[in-house]
Amino acid sequence: MAKKAKYYAVWKGRKTGVFSSWAETEEAVKGFEGAQYKSFDTEAEAEKAAKGNYWQSVQQGATGTKAVTKKNVGKPLANSISVDAACSGNPGVLEYQGVETSTKRVLFSMGPFPEGTVNIGEFLAIVHGLSFLQKHNSDLPIYSDSKTALSWVRNKAIKTNLERNTKTEELFRLVDRALIWLKNNTYSNQVLKWETEFWGENPADYGRK
């Protein structure tokens, strides 16, 4: 049986667009730092994806439509920042930080808070990162390895079972501020998924696993 033809959308490479052969695609992306590309079964799927955002396409694949593979996920952008949270228990004592992806130099850190959840910490870290970059007039992208936090940022809303009480009030005040910031500000920075399976631990990881 003949091998089914593939179509390739290239968002970032020496050439961009839709290609009908791997040879053309490889020429466009091989050795290109931060190349972004993905294969599709039909030309229509590739054309539609190419008009959108690479990371949205990859994340959709992760939820079941297309598998994320080492070939199509590419490499992380070195010129970026990464954020992560650490929680001793969940809920538990919480802290978060943002670092330069390439050097792991800490750019900001918050906590420890007496009680919180990983998802809340990851969410606050992303918004803190966006605010930090805005203050520095920077268009660098941000990486987070939390799908939940990424969706909260996109939706400008959180869903948590953590109780708001005297122990968590300081943390929830930061959440309130973060939600207000998202609703009152626009940003051009890409907020991207750190692909731990292919790239190893997020550079902002606390290394306490």
Image (cartoon, rainbow, N blue to C red):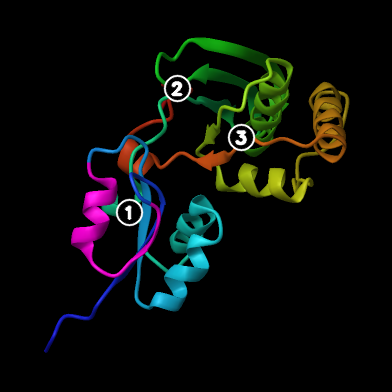
Instruction: Say if 22 sits above or below 197 in the image.
Output: below
**For marks 1 and 2 on the same chain, the one whose residue lies earlier in the sequence:** 1
Camera-nearest label, 3 or 2: 2
Task: Please tell me which residue lies in front, 178 or 91.
Answer: 178
The answer to if 158 sits in the magenta stretch is no
Residue that mark 1 sits on: 72
Q: Are marks 1 and 3 in contact (CB under 8 Å)?
A: no
Q: Which residue lies at the image location 16% right of the left edge and 80% below the top edge? A: 3
The Cα atoms of the two marked residues, 1 and 2, are separated by: 21 Å
- Magenta range is 16-30
Q: Which residue is mark 2?
A: 101
Residue 177, placed above or below residue 45: above
From mark 3 to mark 2, how far is it between C-alphas? 20 Å
Upstream in sequence: badge 1 or badge 3: 1
The residue sitting at 39% across, 76% down in the picture is: 43
Q: Secondary structure at mark 2?
A: loop
Hey, which quadrant is residue 6 in on the image? bottom left
Q: Amino acid at mark 3?
A: Val
Label 2 is placed on what type of residue?
Answer: Thr
Q: Is residue 122 above or below residue 60?
A: above
Q: Position of residue 159 (x, y in %)?
A: 75, 49
Q: Secondary structure at mark 1?
A: helix
Question: Which circle's residue, 3 or 2, is located before the other in the chain?
Answer: 2
Q: Nearer the viewer, residue 98 or 24?
A: 24
Residue at horizontal 48 percent and vertical 53 percent from the top: 54
Is residue 52 found left or right of 58 in the rendered image?
right
Mark 2 packing: few (<14 Cα in 10 Å), some, or many (20+)?
many
Residue that mark 3 sits on: 118
